[in-house]
Image (cartoon, rainbow, N blue to C red):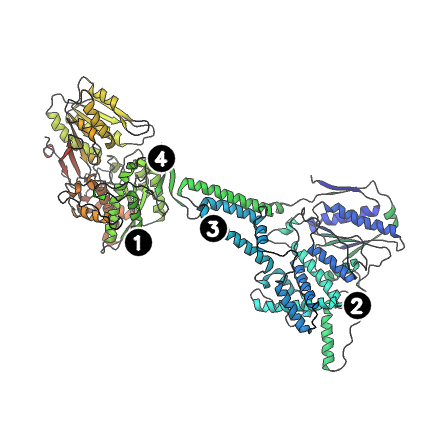
């Protein structure tokens, strides 16, 4: 229930009647907005004494007190002035220039009076010019008044003036709307762009706010568009005073024409104001009624419907003015007459409600007749012209109702002496607080400020969320193609596609290439790829290849990213070759996609690749995905459904080509490697009595998605059994708790301490664990003095044996090399690659010279990963640019089955003759023997075949020493 704010008893019946009438008019304004009268209460008996008049006056005060605290805009007036005109004018000025009594507790913000302020500026300028001692002609006086108005910026001056500091403080106070927004925006910016740029933005914003505040209060631009200026130029009340510039001379789109109308009318008003100050009764009445008209227009504007701030829905009670005693001397009657005249002349319904008391012996009549018009010269044209001009001057006043006409807008309440004297103490008068409407709660400054601050705070929190979720997550320019995900050890890494310059997977990665590439860092290779992309114009024919690999690792061990570095280097080398070749009109654009450390997030990366491909039709396929995990099949299937082919680099999974027709592998599968190793194992088994073997494999951890070692264990076991070995045990080893070194002590003691030490060991582990295995075999009793043959499925060309492995002198290693560099051609590739990489070094630095005989044995190429990724990119590009015309992803997929690239570093890169859902036996392979593993290890190629050679290897091709 609405809170009660005032309670009193009615002194008499008249008080109760007047109170209930006023409250009904006020409270019903919200429902049907009744026409507001000028209520005049007066004792009906003209002979009533002062006591009765005092009772009527107390009624006005009681109604005033009853509405003071209930959010009704009220004003108690008391005219002060030497003449009734000055007193009435002072009351109008009080209403427009002084705060109303409910300023702090009103339903909505305080009233504004722009029209009244404009008239006040004209009055101020006129008074300044008139008080000057020099005597000037009327025309010169008008010009001086207009000049004074210009110096005032057409606004009445206020006490204290305005300066920059005050403007700034007024703008950014936290309790103001602009201040709240200012603070909220700064909070967001601080999180978005850092404190240095935020400080610069803050300084610029503070300066801008101060300038805007000062300009809007002192020298508003576009003066002819202001509401007050438009009213002055278009109101019909001034049409007769400025016939040279009619109302239709003002226009939204005509500043000069509108300005002439405004100046002409301002001069006309100033002239009448000056005449009023000189005592001209006609001018005084004109001046007072113009002021009242401006007041009523301003009040009407404060209640206008369809405003952006919904003010009509917020103000549900009318403004109420109280005149405790209205007489001719104190200007009260003159003010009531002026309001009545303006309303009658304009037929406007405004919201003003007035309650006044009139002494019993006074007569409420119309404005008394004005003095007779000044005589004019009779006869002749000049006399007629003078009479016309006099008529024009009096037209505004003459339009008022005649003295005989009743006061149409005045509601007289004659109160009998009995009503005023009959005690009515038992009647309780109560007022309750006027509720603020839903419009106020929805569209108040506080609500909008809170909503905006809340929105900005939410935006700030959302921005922080985006920064945590995406690798580049500002509100403007957000890239959703790369996300932050926890990697091994819980450290977040960036996974996805780098489609914006701000996403750099290798940023700060100083890992360098091996061999002649020493000095070229991972960060520089990634930058070089982007530099190539920038050289391709948006309208230039091009195809886009996405390289997907392990581009991030732990900060403590950058070596985790070597595979990504070497593969991306191969992709870059072919991109540079294509874009620098003059006869190739289709350029090659490369996007990098990170599958996370050890490719443990490749499904996430693939989904991002698919999203990019949907938006960019130039994407023709994917190169990479060179690690076999439990997600490899799912990732390949997702790309198949998206219509994207995959040219894989070093993934040796045996079943991917059988299951997915979009899969094209560059590396020999695990089964192909095992078959080739079986040729050597069969020879060894033939020379032994009851050959024994064991499979030693890495144990898969709870969070390890590695599928490679699981398949290696399977194919290794099958190969040994088919070669004639008796597999005595299947032993597993684990990694240390930190995921680092291999724990091989217990497994090796079990193997070497067996009753029969095996003749052969198939190691289904990773290349990084081979050093530990070799040193363990050389130091563990039972194995250290026995000749043991170790087969391994992982490509050891990238292995680097250390001093500890010298102990394994009797161990012989056999492994399959996925890049048979000794079998292929393309010898110019190596020197061209060295020159291309040398161009990435700082000016003046050079790379070492490659050996002429066997350049592929340099550590830059020996691992084969750079070469394989180069060839994979070449194959995909060749399929995507058939007849030197860009192809779609679907066309590229189909064309890959007919690609044949001859004289490549590992042989002929081709998929001709292969069919979907079948093994692709076109891979090159070398079987390498390593003896005396250690820093002085000796290796030789036992046998092998070049890429594209379908002739199967035989035992005769793989002799064993």
Q: Which residue is mark 4?
A: 487
Q: Which residue is mark 2?
A: 370
Residue pictured at 69% horizontal, 74% vertical: 137
**Distance from the alpha carbon under mark 3 to that under mark 2:** 66 Å
**Distance from the alpha carbon under mark 1 to that under mark 4:** 34 Å
Would you place residue 192 above or below residue 302 in this image?
above
Disc 3 versus disc 4: nearer the observer: 3
Judging from the image, what secondary structure is the residue with disc 4 in? loop
Label pair 3/1, CB-CB below 8 angstroms: no
Q: Furthest-front residue in view?
A: 133
Q: What x and y, as percent, mark residue 54?
A: 84, 50
Q: Which mark is first along the chain, 1 or 3?
A: 3
Q: Which mark is first along the chain, 2 or 1?
A: 2
Judge by depth and name the residue closer to the eye, 331 or 30.
331
For the N terminus, the image quarter is: top right
Label pair 1/4, CB-CB below 8 angstroms: no
**Distance from the alpha carbon under mark 1 to that under mark 2:** 88 Å
Q: Which residue is mark 3?
A: 200
Q: What x and y, as percent, mark residue 753?
A: 20, 18
Say left or right for 615 vs 430. Answer: left
Q: Residues within 10 Å of mark 2 (few under 14, many from 20)?
A: few
Judging from the image, what secondary structure is the residue with disc 3 in? helix
């Amino acid at each position: 229930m609405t809170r009660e704010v005032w309670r009193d008893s009615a002194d008499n019946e008249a008080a109760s009647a007047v109170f209930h009438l006023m409250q009904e008019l006020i409270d019903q304004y919200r429902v049907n907005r009744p026409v507001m009268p000028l209520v005049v209460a007066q004792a009906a008996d003209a002979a009533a004494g002062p006591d009765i008049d005092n009772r009527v006056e107390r009624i006005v005060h009681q109604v005033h007190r009853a509405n003071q605290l209930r959010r009704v805009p009220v004003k108690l007036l008391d005219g002060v002035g030497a003449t009734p005109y000055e007193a009435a004018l002072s009351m109008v000025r009080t209403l427009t220039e002084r705060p109303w009594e409910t300023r702090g507790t009103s339903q909505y913000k305080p009233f504004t009076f722009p029209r009244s302020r404009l008239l006040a500026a004209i009055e101020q300028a006129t008074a300044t010019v008139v008080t000057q001692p020099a005597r000037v002609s009327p025309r010169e006086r008008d010009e001086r008044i207009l000049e004074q108005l210009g110096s005032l910026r057409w606004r009445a001056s206020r006490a204290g003036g305005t300066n920059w500091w005050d403007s700034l403080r007024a703008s950014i106070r936290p309790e103001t709307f602009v201040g709240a927004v200012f603070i909220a925006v700064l909070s967001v910016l601080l999180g978005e762009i850092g404190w240095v740029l935020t400080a610069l933005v803050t300084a610029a914003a503070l300066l801008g706010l101060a300038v805007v505040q000062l300009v809007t209060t002192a020298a508003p631009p576009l003066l002819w568009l202001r509401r007050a200026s438009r009213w002055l130029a278009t109101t019909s009340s001034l049409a007769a005073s400025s016939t040279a510039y009619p109302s239709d001379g003002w226009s939204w789109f005509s500043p000069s024409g509108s300005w002439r109308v405004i100046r002409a009318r301002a001069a006309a008003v100033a002239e009448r104001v000056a005449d009023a100050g000189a005592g001209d009764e006609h001018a005084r009445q004109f001046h007072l009624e113009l002021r009242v008209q401006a007041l009523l227009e301003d009040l009407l504007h404060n209640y206008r419907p369809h405003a952006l701030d919904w003010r009509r829905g917020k103000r549900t009670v009318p403004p109420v003015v109280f005149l405790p005693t209205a007489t001719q001397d104190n200007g009260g009657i003159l003010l009531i007459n002026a309001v009545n005249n303006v309303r009658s002349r304009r037929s406007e319904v405004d919201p003003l409600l007035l309650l006044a008391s009139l002494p019993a012996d006074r007569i409420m009549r119309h404005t008394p007749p004005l003095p007779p018009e000044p005589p004019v010269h009779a006869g002749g044209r000049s006399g007629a012209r003078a009479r016309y001009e006099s008529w024009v001057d009096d037209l505004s006043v003459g339009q008022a109702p005649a003295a005989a006409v009743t006061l149409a807008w005045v509601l007289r309440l004659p109160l009998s002496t009995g009503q005023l004297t009959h005690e009515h103490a038992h009647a309780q008068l109560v007022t309750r607080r006027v509720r603020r409407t839903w419009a106020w709660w929805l569209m108040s400054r506080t609500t909008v400020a809170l909503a905006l601050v809340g929105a900005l705070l939410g935006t700030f929190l959302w921005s922080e969320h985006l920064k945590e979720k995406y690798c580049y997550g500002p509100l403007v320019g957000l890239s959703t193609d790369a996300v932050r995900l926890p990697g091994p050890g819980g450290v977040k890494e960036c996974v996805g596609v780098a489609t914006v310059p701000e996403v750099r997977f290798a940023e700060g990665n100083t890992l360098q290439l091996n061999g002649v590439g020493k000095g070229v860092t991972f960060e520089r290779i990634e930058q070089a790829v982007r530099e190539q992309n920038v050289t391709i114009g948006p309208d230039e024919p091009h195809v886009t290849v996405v390289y997907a690999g392990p581009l991030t690792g732990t900060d403590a061990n950058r070596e985790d990213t070597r595979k990504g570095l070497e593969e991306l280097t191969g992709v870059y080398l072919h991109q540079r070759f294509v874009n620098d070749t003059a006869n190739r009109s289709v350029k090659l654009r490369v996007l990098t996609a990170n599958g996370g450390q050890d490719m443990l997030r490749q499904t996430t990366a693939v989904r991002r690749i698919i999203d990019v491909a949907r938006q960019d039709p130039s994407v023709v396929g994917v190169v990479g995905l060179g690690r076999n995990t439990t997600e490899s099949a799912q990732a390949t299937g997702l790309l198949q459904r998206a219509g994207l082919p995959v040219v894989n680099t070093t993934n040796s999974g045996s079943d991917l080509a059988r299951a997915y027709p979009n899969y094209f592998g560059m590396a020999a599968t695990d089964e192909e490697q095992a078959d080739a190793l079986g040729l050597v194992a069969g020879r060894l088994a033939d020379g032994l009595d009851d050959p024994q073997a064991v499979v030693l494999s890495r144990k898969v951890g709870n969070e390890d998605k590695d599928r490679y070692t699981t398949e290696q264990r399977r194919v290794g076991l099958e190969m040994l059994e088919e070669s004639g070995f008796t597999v005595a045990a299947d032993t597993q080893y684990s990694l240390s708790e930190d995921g680092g070194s291999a724990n091989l002590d217990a497994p090796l003691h079990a193997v070497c301490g067996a009753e029969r030490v095996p003749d052969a060991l198939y190691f289904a582990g990773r290349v990084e664990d081979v050093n530990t295995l070799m040193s363990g075999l050389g130091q563990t009793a039972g194995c250290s003095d026995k000749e043991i043959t170790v087969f391994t499925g992982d490509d050891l060309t990238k292995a680097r044996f250390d001093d500890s492995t010298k102990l394994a002198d009797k161990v012989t290693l056999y492994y399959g090399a996925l890049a048979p560099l000794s079998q292929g051609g393309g010898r110019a590739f190596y020197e061209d690659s060295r020159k291309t990489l040398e161009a990435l070094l700082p000016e003046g630095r050079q790379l070492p010279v490659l050996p002429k005989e066997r350049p592929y044995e340099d550590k830059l190429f020996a691992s084969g990963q750079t070469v394989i990724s180069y060839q994979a990119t070449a194959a995909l590009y060749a399929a995507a640019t058939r007849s030197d015309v860009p192809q779609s992803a679907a066309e590229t997929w189909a064309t890959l089955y007919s690609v044949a690239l001859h004289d490549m570093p590992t042989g002929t890169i081709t998929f001709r003759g292969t069919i979907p859902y079948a093994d692709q036996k076109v891979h090159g392979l070398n079987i390498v023997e390593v003896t005396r593993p250690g820093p002085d290890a000796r290796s030789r190629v036992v046998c092998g075949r070049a890429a594209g050679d379908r002739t199967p290897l035989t035992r005769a091709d793989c002799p064993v020493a």
